[in-house]
Image (tube, rainbow, N blue to C red):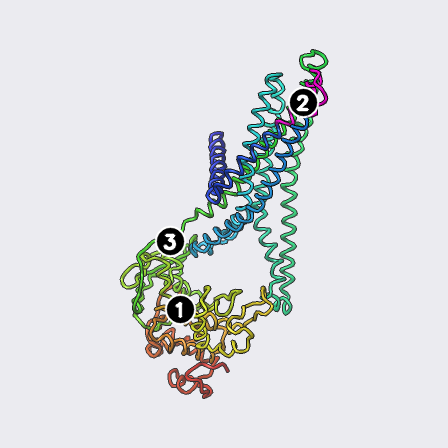
């Protein structure tokens, strides 16, 4: 058992060293010249100040004892003051520069983390612990760099000060060096326990804070405002917030008592006994009783003992800070070292000149930490320029299939080929460039309408392309009502002249992205679900007409849209159950036909639909579209 504990402590110590070296190395990668100069000058000024403080009184008392003139003593004091003033000025300048540098570091670290997150495989987002890991990595990283550099300065300066002052003490009385050393060792042990207590407290507090912040955040975010006023949802949210407060209070009580006990023991033993009582008593004995030391020695040695302890204590604090840095850097290091399997830049180049052939061969998929397959043995061929519809009940695996096609996930088993090559062999960036995708939950960003269409900063000459795409989704009239047209910022969070779009208008902007992008394959994951059936039908017809020279794969719950597809795949529990055109699947009278007829019970159809499925309904002119009663 003791061996296991020893191995655990050794491993923890190695991690502590490794993490501190990691963050130090990271700091020097950011700005090697600045940090080298900063550390050297900071250490020098600290050492000079410490030695000056210890020796000044001794110099003055010894000078008086030796009969030096007032002018000589005054010159000595002025010299010491000039040196001290210079070090203080240098310290203030360094502090200012460090504060300015910290702003650059904050921006750099957050950019690094954002870049890392943007490159991480989508499957990480399916793990709830990922969000806690992200918060811990992004919340402490830049602070740890600043603390690490300051800690290196502290450790080096304290070590040099201790060595210098101890050398002076040893020449007078070596026993004096024992008192601050004992206090130092006791202090380190106490700080180690305190850090471990605070670290455990922080780990348990993070999910509580996340819950508390979520409960509070929804009260001031605009997307929740309407439902907040129209429902009673605020009551459970406030209850949830209160529970988080109670949990926080319980946690603080649990760890606060432990921290207070350790602190009390440390203060009594270290300060009261080892520093305030023993050194002055020992020095007084030898100055008054044995007369082994002079008054100057008494004054300087008492200062020296205090200074050594202060330096040892700060060295201990530096150790404590290093321990803390090591604990929190563990999250940053692990986060930055997370494997990236999909979003790697390496791979075969891919420059298509025509629409490709895509094959799914025995594709199966399950999420991490799950035994249930979302997709099982899916075999599918998507021919060039073909229009494919994917249908099925919720949870059938349709959206997962789309994510596999876009290589947001990799299959658990089987493979997907594009023009006979495994898509995992292609450069991921070039592979995805061949696709234009619109999702049901596509997002709008606090940027101009044009930028939301092009999804990047663009030249003035490209606005015509964005205008054309917006015209295809019938948003040109909306642009005409806006003061700044397509340059209008979406949302009013940062611009009072911005605009808010309806759900349907927002989906149209997302769909316009497909028209604006030159891609050979278009993926539509229910992008028009916020539109009414007629508007959805018209838009889908428009999209298919505009994409006649592209391959289209779309998911739709409204089966009138699937009539436009060359081939329909019906999924059930992750497997393909039926394949064929609309007419073929209606003809075999299987699950697709049942779904289609079931929708007919809630909708009316025009004469063309009634002819296909034999279901009665009002004769509404809508070009074959299902119209709500």
User: Badge 2: how crowded within 10 Å, few (<14), some, or many (20+)?
Assistant: many
Of badges 2 and 3, the one in the foreground is 2
Q: Which residues are magenta?
A: 51-75
- Identify the element where label 2 is drawn: helix
Q: Is residue 370 above or below residue 256?
A: below
Q: Nearer the viewer, residue 187 or 516?
A: 516
Q: Quadrant of residue 85?
A: top right
Q: Residue furthest front?
A: 71
Q: Horizontal and vertical percent for residue 51? A: 61, 26
Q: Is residue 49 above or below residue 574?
A: above
Give the residue at mark 2.
Answer: 302
Cα gap from disc 1 to disc 2, whole angstroms? 77 Å
Relative to residue 173, is residue 586 drawn left or right?
Answer: left
Give the residue at mark 3.
Answer: 344
Q: Residue furthest left?
A: 420
Q: Horizontal and vertical percent for residue 213? A: 60, 55
Give the residue at mark 1.
Answer: 517
Q: Horizontal and vertical percent for residue 248? A: 63, 48
Does the magenta segment cover residue 471? no
User: Badge 3: how crowded within 10 Å, few (<14), some, or many (20+)?
Assistant: some
Q: Earlier in the sequence, mark 2 or mark 3?
A: 2
Q: Residue furthest top?
A: 290
Q: Which mark is residue 481?
A: none
Cα gap from disc 2 to disc 3, whole angstroms? 63 Å
The residue under the point 64% across, 46% down is 250
Task: Check contact, mark 2 vs mark 3: CB within 8 A.
Answer: no
Of badges 1 and 3, the one in the foreground is 1
User: Badge 1: how crowded within 10 Å, few (<14), some, or many (20+)?
Assistant: many
- Work out whether residue 526 can be spotted: no
Q: Nearer the viewer, residue 163 or 272?
A: 163
- Work out whether residue 112 can be spotted: yes
């Amino acid at each position: 058992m003791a061996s296991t504990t020893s191995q655990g402590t050794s491993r923890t110590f190695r991690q502590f060293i490794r993490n501190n070296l990691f963050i130090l190395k990271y700091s020097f990668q950011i700005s090697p010249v600045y940090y080298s100069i900063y550390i050297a000058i900071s250490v020098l000024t600290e050492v000079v100040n410490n030695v000056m403080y210890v020796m000044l009184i001794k110099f003055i008392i010894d000078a008086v004892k030796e009969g030096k003139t007032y002018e000589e003593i005054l010159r000595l004091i002025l010299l010491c003051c000039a040196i001290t003033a210079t070090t203080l000025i240098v310290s203030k300048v360094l502090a200012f520069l460090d504060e300015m540098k910290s702003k650059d570091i904050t921006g750099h670290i957050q950019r690094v983390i954002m870049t890392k997150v943007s490159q991480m495989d989508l499957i990480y987002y399916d793990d709830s612990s990922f969000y806690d890991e992200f918060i811990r990595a992004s919340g402490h990283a830049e602070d740890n760099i600043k603390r690490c550099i300051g800690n290196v300065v502290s450790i080096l300066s304290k070590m040099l000060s201790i060595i210098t002052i101890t050398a002076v003490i040893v020449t007078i009385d070596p026993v004096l060096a024992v008192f601050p050393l004992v206090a130092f060792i006791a202090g380190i042990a106490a700080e180690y326990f305190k850090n471990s207590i605070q670290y455990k407290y922080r780990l348990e507090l993070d999910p509580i804070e996340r819950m508390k912040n979520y409960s509070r955040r929804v009260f001031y975010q605009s997307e929740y405002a309407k439902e907040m006023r129209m429902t009673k949802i605020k009551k459970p949210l406030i209850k949830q917030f209160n529970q988080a407060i109670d949990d926080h209070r319980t946690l603080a009580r649990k760890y606060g008592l432990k921290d207070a006990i350790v602190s009390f023991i440390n203060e009594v033993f270290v300060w009261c006994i080892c520093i305030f009582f023993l050194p002055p008593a020992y020095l007084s004995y030898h100055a008054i009783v044995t007369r082994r030391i002079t008054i100057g020695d008494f004054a300087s040695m008492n200062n020296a003992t205090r200074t050594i302890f202060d330096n040892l204590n700060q060295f201990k604090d530096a150790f404590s800070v290093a321990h803390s840095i090591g604990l929190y850097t563990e999250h940053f290091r692990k986060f930055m070292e997370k494997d990236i399997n999909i979003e790697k830049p390496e791979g075969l180049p891919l420059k298509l000149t025509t629409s490709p052939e895509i094959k799914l061969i025995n594709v199966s998929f399950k999420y991490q930490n799950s035994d249930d397959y979302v997709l099982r043995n899916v075999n599918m061929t998507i021919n060039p320029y073909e229009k494919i519809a994917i249908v099925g009940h919720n949870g059938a695996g349709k959206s997962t299939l789309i994510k596999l096609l876009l290589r947001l996930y990799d299959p658990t088993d089987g493979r997907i080929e594009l023009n006979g090559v495994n898509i995992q062999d292609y450069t991921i960036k070039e592979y995805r460039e061949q696709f234009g995708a619109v999702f049901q939950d596509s997002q709008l960003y606090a940027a101009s309408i044009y930028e939301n269409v092009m999804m990047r900063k663009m030249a003035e000459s490209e606005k015509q392309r964005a205008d054309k795409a917006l015209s295809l989704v019938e948003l040109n009239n909306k642009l005409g009502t806006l003061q700044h047209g397509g340059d209008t910022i979406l949302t009013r969070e940062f611009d009072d002249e911005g605009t808010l779009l309806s759900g349907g208008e927002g989906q149209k902007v997302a769909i316009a992205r497909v028209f604006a992008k030159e891609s050979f394959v278009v993926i539509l994951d229910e992008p028009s679900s916020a539109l009414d059936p007629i508007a959805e039908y018209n838009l889908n017809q428009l999209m298919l007409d505009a994409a006649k020279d592209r391959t289209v794969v779309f998911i739709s719950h409204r089966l009138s849209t699937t009539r436009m597809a060359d081939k329909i795949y019906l999924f059930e529990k992750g497997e393909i159950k039926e394949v064929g055109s609309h007419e073929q699947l209606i003809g075999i009278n299987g699950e697709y036909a049942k779904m289609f007829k079931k929708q007919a019970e809630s909708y009316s159809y025009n004469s063309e639909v009634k002819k296909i499925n034999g279901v009665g309904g009002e004769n509404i002119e809508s070009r074959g579209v299902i119209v709500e009663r």
